[in-house]
Amino acid sequence: MLRQFKRTKLLCALRVISLSVPILAANATSITVPNFSFESPALPNGSNNNGGNGDTTAIPGWTITAPASSGANNGVYHPASGFTSTNPLPAPADWNQVAYLFPGAAGATSSITTTNSLGSVAPNLDYVLTVALGNRNDALFFDTGTYTIALLANGVSVAQTNFAGNLIAHGTFVDVSTSFVSPSSGPLIGESLTIELSATAGSSSDEGILDNVRLTASSVPDTGSTFALLLLSLTALFSAARFRSNSLA
């Protein structure tokens, strides 16, 4: 009889806790990234366009920041070679074209940033940025370069991942991600969210290749509310058990 009572009490505890603790959302919502696979402008096979520091038209939807050593050697490229396949490019790249960044000197960095805001930072969200990073298989390797992908709030990095170019096999792409969880309140909430993608050269011939930029947001529980609900549930459980014990005495 006592064993059955303890079993019933345990089942009640599990039910109370499962009802009280919020469940983490499994589905992520995609946030639109303008010109995410750099198919605009549509270029002939094997050709590229060019843009230098401050250019906002060479890669529509993105603003170029580049050092003097780069000149205007940044933009959109439609490869006819240099990868294991073209038209389309190998996954996880998307479709036929890429963004290319050519810093032009060891230690120099070229970058692109979404020109317009992707929205305001909302509370209790897990933001995940994923980008396909490439490494050509011809003379313009990125073997000594370093990629940086970052999420910015009001222009300040809130999530950043660095990735060495020599970790990418020649002629291929790999997905690299960075993420952050927004707080339930505070100054970060409401700030403007943008993306920055950078290539830092280790030699004068390094060329960074980027494609298929994706951004998602998933709801996460408010940890303060979750803890309060769990504590309330456990308090109610122990009170009920104590009342039951006193009744049986």
Image (spheres, rainbow, N blue to C red):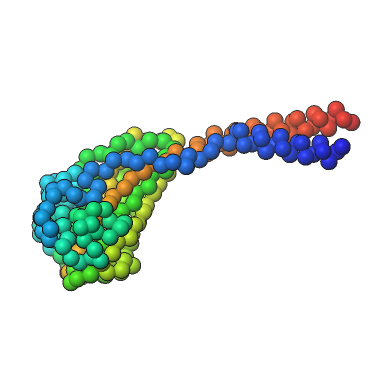
Taking the image as shown, residue 233 lies to the left or right of residue 166, namely right
Specify the quadrant that holds the C terminus. Answer: top right
Residue 141 falls in which quadrant of the image?
bottom left
Residue 83 falls in which quadrant of the image?
bottom left
User: Residue placed at 31% from the left, 51% from the top?
Assistant: 150
What is the total number of numbered labels drawn onto the structure image?
A: 0
Residue most toward the right? 249
Q: Is residue 232 above or below residue 145?
A: above
Residue 54, can we see it? no
Residue 121 falls in which quadrant of the image?
top left
User: Residue placed at 38% from the left, 35% from the top?
Assistant: 122
Residue 64: where, in percent of width, then height?
A: 17, 51
Return the residue nearer the eye: 222 or 2. Answer: 2
Return the residue nearer the eye: 110 or 143. Answer: 143
User: Residue placed at 35% from the left, 57% from the top?
Assistant: 176
Residue 173: where, in percent of width, then height?
A: 29, 61
Q: Is residue 52 above or below residue 239?
A: below
User: Residue placed at 74% from the left, 31% from the top?
Assistant: 239
Residue 80, can we see it? yes
Residue 7: where, in percent of width, then height?
A: 77, 40
Specify the quadrant that holds the N terminus. Answer: top right
Taking the image as shown, residue 44 lies to the left or right of residue 154, namely left
Taking the image as shown, residue 123 lies to the left or right of residue 60, namely right
Return the residue nearer the eye: 11 or 146. Answer: 11
